[in-house]
Structure formats: C-alpha cells, structure tokens
Image (tube, rainbow, N blue to C red):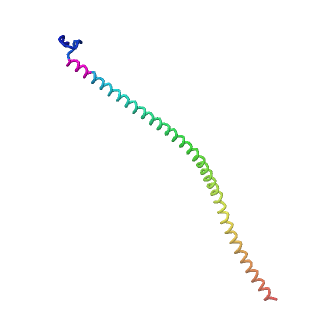
Amino acid sequence: MRNLGSSNGSGLSTDEIEDEEMARMAIATFQAREEEIERKKTEVKERVELQLGRAEEESRRLAQIWEELEVLTDPMRKEVAVVRKKIDMANRELKPLGQSIQKKEREYKEALEAFNEKSKEKAQLVTALMEVN
C-alpha cells in the first residue's frame, strides 16, 4: 500500500523501499545461488561425461587386447592339439612295435636255446666219434 504523505516523491515509504530493496537483494542472491548450482551441475556433468568417455575408450581397448590375446592363444591351442594328435598316433604305432619286439625276443631266445642244444648235441657226437676212432 502506498503512503501518499511520503516525502520522496515516488509515493513509497522508506520501509517499503527498504523491503523492496531487500526483496531484490534476496532474489538476486537466490538467482546467483541458482546460477552457481547450475554451473557446478554443468561442471559435474562434464566431468562425468569425460570419465564415462575414458571408461568407454578403456573398455574398447581392453576388448581389442582380449581379441589379440585370443588370436595369439588360438594358434597355440591348434599347435598343442596337433602335437597331441601326433603323440597319440606315435603311441598307437609304438604298441604293435613293442609287441613285435617282445615276440621276436621270445623267438630269438627259443632259437638260441635250440642252437645251444644242437651245439651241445654236436659236441657230444663229436666226442663220441673220437672215442670210437
């Protein structure tokens, strides 16, 4: 409400002017705080986006490194599988060869025994022949 008897010519009393000034200052302070909050909010948002971008880049780099490691290990796996297959094949080939060796060793021992027996028999016959002469 305006006081018509005031001396300042605007029609407002000193209290009203002070109240209006305080209200403007409060609004200006509030607006300044809002602007500061918005600025800080923007800064935080930018920092979060920057960190998120770095994290995404690191994630891509890790995925690429993982793929490179898999490429390196795949040939190793293939080589290991090939070597294992060759070992299995060699084992399969060794088994009959081992059996053949054992059979031939038995045959050799039997032949050696037969040879030794015939040699003894021959020696006895030679001795008997000399005794007869």
Q: Position of residue 43 (x, y in %)?
A: 40, 32
Question: Quick one: 115 or 121, which is closer to the camera?
Answer: 115
Q: Is residue 103 above or below residue 13?
A: below
Question: Quick one: 53 or 93, which is closer to the camera?
Answer: 53
Quarter holding the C terminus is bottom right
Query: What's the residue at 23%, 18% (across, down)?
Result: 17
Query: What's the residue at 17%, 11% (across, down)?
Result: 5
In the rendered image, residue 19 lying in the magenta stretch gets the answer: yes
Quarter holding the N terminus is top left
Q: Spot the residue most to the left.
A: 5
Rendered image quadrant of residue 22:
top left
Q: Spot the residue most to the right.
A: 133
**Is residue 18 found left or right of 77 in the rendered image?**
left
Q: Main secondary structure of the magenta part?
A: helix
Q: Which residues are magenta?
A: 14-23
**Is residue 104 found left or right of 49 in the rendered image?**
right
Query: What's the residue at 35%, 29% (across, down)?
Result: 36
Q: Position of residue 35 (x, y in %)?
A: 35, 27
Q: Position of residue 66 (x, y in %)?
A: 53, 43
Q: Is residue 107 above or below residue 31?
A: below
Q: Is residue 16 above or below residue 108?
A: above
Question: Quick one: 48 or 74, which is closer to the camera?
Answer: 48
Q: Is residue 82 above or below residue 45?
A: below
Rendered image quadrant of residue 34:
top left
In the rendered image, residue 89 lying in the magenta stretch gets the answer: no
Q: Position of residue 46 (x, y in %)?
A: 43, 32
Q: How many callouts does the rendering have?
A: 0
Query: What's the residue at 78%, 84% (across, down)?
Result: 126
Q: Spot the residue most to the front.
A: 7
Question: Quick one: 51 or 9, which is closer to the camera?
Answer: 9
**Is residue 55 found left or right of 122 in the rendered image?**
left
